[in-house]
Image (cartoon, rainbow, N blue to C red):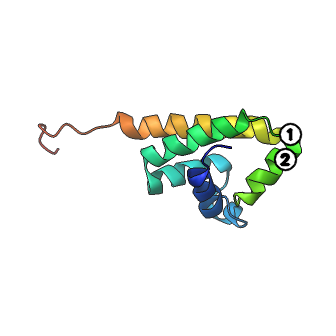
Amino acid sequence: MPDNEQLSHLFGAYFHQDWTLDAPSWKHVVRQYLKDEGSAAGDLAADAAFTLADSALSDQDLAAHIAKLGCYYWPGGTQAFRPWLKSLALELRIHSAANNSFKPNPLRGSA
């Protein structure tokens, strides 16, 4: 089983039981997580999500494991967790890269 420290933090702190009160969608949760935790944490969480999605766990065991990590997101069925984890990892990567793409030029004066 992969090291799930970053996933545990993402799920427990951001996909907690009241996450729908904090954000309109799981993608908004990802953006808030990256804003708060940074791109490096997002990359680690993405790696862990991809690894977990590719694990040999049955769909039911995967759903139970994700719940143990503190995740209250429900993708519509136990068989939907694997594709959702991959979507989650991609979303983390996309927004993490976007956060890193803008680097102010220190030689340029402020406008």
Taking depth in this image into account, of 42 and 100 the one nearest to the observer is 42
Label disc, if present, on residue 61 of the rendered structure: 2
Residue 17 percent coordinates (x, y): 73, 66
The residue at which mark 1 appears reads as 58
Residue 74 visible at all: no
Q: Report, in whole angstroms, how far the alpha carbon at label 1 lies from the one at label 2.
A: 5 Å
**Secondary element at image label 1:** loop
Drawn side of residue 90 relative to residue 67, left or right: left
Count of marks, rendered view: 2
In this rendering, does residue 84 appear at all? yes
Q: Residues within 10 Å of mark 2 (few under 14, many from 20)?
A: few
Residue at 68% in and 64% down? 16
- Which residue is rendered at x = 67% and y = 55% of the image? 24
Q: Residue at x 53, y 54 (%)?
A: 32
Instruction: Tell me the quadrant of the picture where the C terminus can be found.
Output: top left
Q: Which amino acid does the dot numbered 2 rest on?
A: Asp
* SS at badge 2: helix
In the rendered image, residue 36, in percent from the top left (x then y), is placed at 46, 57
Task: Tell which of 83 and 50 is nearer to you.
Answer: 50
Task: Give me the residue at 72% from left, 32% from top.
Answer: 54
83 left or right of 76 in image? left
